[in-house]
Image (spheres, rainbow, N blue to C red):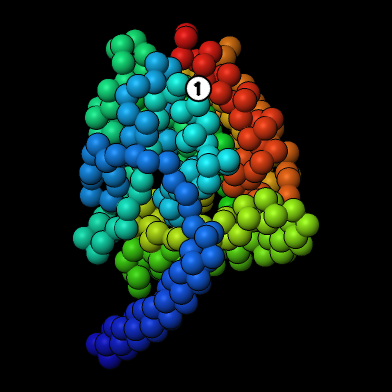
Amino acid sequence: MALGKDRRLGRAVAEHLLGYLGGMIDRYRRRRGRVLDAMGLGPRETPSETVLRGPTYTLRLYGGQGGKGPAVLIVPAPIKRAYIWDLDHEISAVRRFLGQGIRVWLIRWEMPGIQDQGLGLAHYAGRYILDCLEAMESGPKNKRPILAGHSLGGTFAAIFAALHPDMVGGLVLLGAPIRFGPGVGAIDSLVARAPGACVFTSISGNVPGWFLGAMSTLASPASFQAERWADWQSSLTDPRLLRTHMKVRRWTLDELPMPGLLFEEVVERLYRRDCFMGSRLDIDGKCATPRSIRAPILTVADRRSVLVPPEASLPLNDIAGNQANRVLWYEEEPGVALQHVGMLVGRRAHQSLWPAILRWIGECGKA
């Protein structure tokens, strides 16, 4: 009896300390964000309208329904704000799509509340994407929308395409981990050494964004610290590169908590057990297996990445065989702060990589 009481007391103390520490960190990061905003380093987003609201998301439509091209639904990662897809006018993936007449929707993940702790992969990679696709007026019935996702957002898009192969006309996966497990990537290796995810969710419920950022830094200090400072130094002589660098730094302060169940399932079912590639990922009683995907896949990979190395992002192209599948390579460049998001905001990427992405989407939309 005394042991159980001591454990409850220890957990209460841990919760109090974590809440106090988290509050201090959050206030500090918000203050830094306001300073950078005052310096004109906040996002310059393209006007959009809300067409659907869900428990932890809103569906945004850009440019109205005037475009005649394919319909694209952007699925961002659920950890930081979605405006990395639309950071500034010159380096906006959203504006690239609109410039080609593509109709663009974006799922904007919102702040989960205490009542949302039980939301998991079935919601983020299943029901919410389904609700958004049903809300989209994507044109003729035979023109299925294309899902575009970066990082974990691309993982969610791939899982959805496996669950609903008849609803997806194509997949654009940018720096998206598909294969997981010890030795695959830096985060996978950290997870393999860490305690079970429930250790964290039992204390915090929803997992704070600052904690997720800290764990990412712990997994790869070079990617999130050393390379970031080296990038700052290499950007000093070019005002445009420095501006992009600082805008990305501002974006890194805009973090979202992850619902407790989603965190547990991403850590245990994906990173630790690789259930998706192993065809053991059950979502609402249905198995999500890569071999079910029928849509053509465009994968954008980074040869040098330790967060999402090629062995993590490329396997889906071989398993989900389609003659239209293609791989494009992102070449690292200065001025992006974090190479992991360089394929979205890099100036060289927008000059050389994005024209190829848009051509592939155009061809996919005609098929």
Residue at 45 percent of width and 55 percent of height:
80
Dot 1: within a 10 Å radius of its alpha carbon, few (fewer than 14), some, or many (20 or more) residues? some
Residue at 66 percent of width and 37 percent of height:
349
Provide residue 163's location: percent of width, then percent of height.
35, 28
Quick one: 104 or 306, which is closer to the camera? Answer: 104
Residue at 28 percent of width and 51 percent of height:
56
Q: Can you see residue 227? A: no
Say which residue label 1 marks. Answer: 100
SS class of the residue under badge 1? loop
Which image quadrant is residue 68 in?
top left
Which quarter of the rendered picture does the N terminus lie within?
A: bottom left
Report whether 152 appears left or right of 348: left
In the image, residue 36 sits, relative to residue 19, either above or below, namely: above
Quick one: 27 or 258, which is closer to the camera? Answer: 27
Report whether 323 appears left or right of 104: right
Mark 1 residue type:
Gln
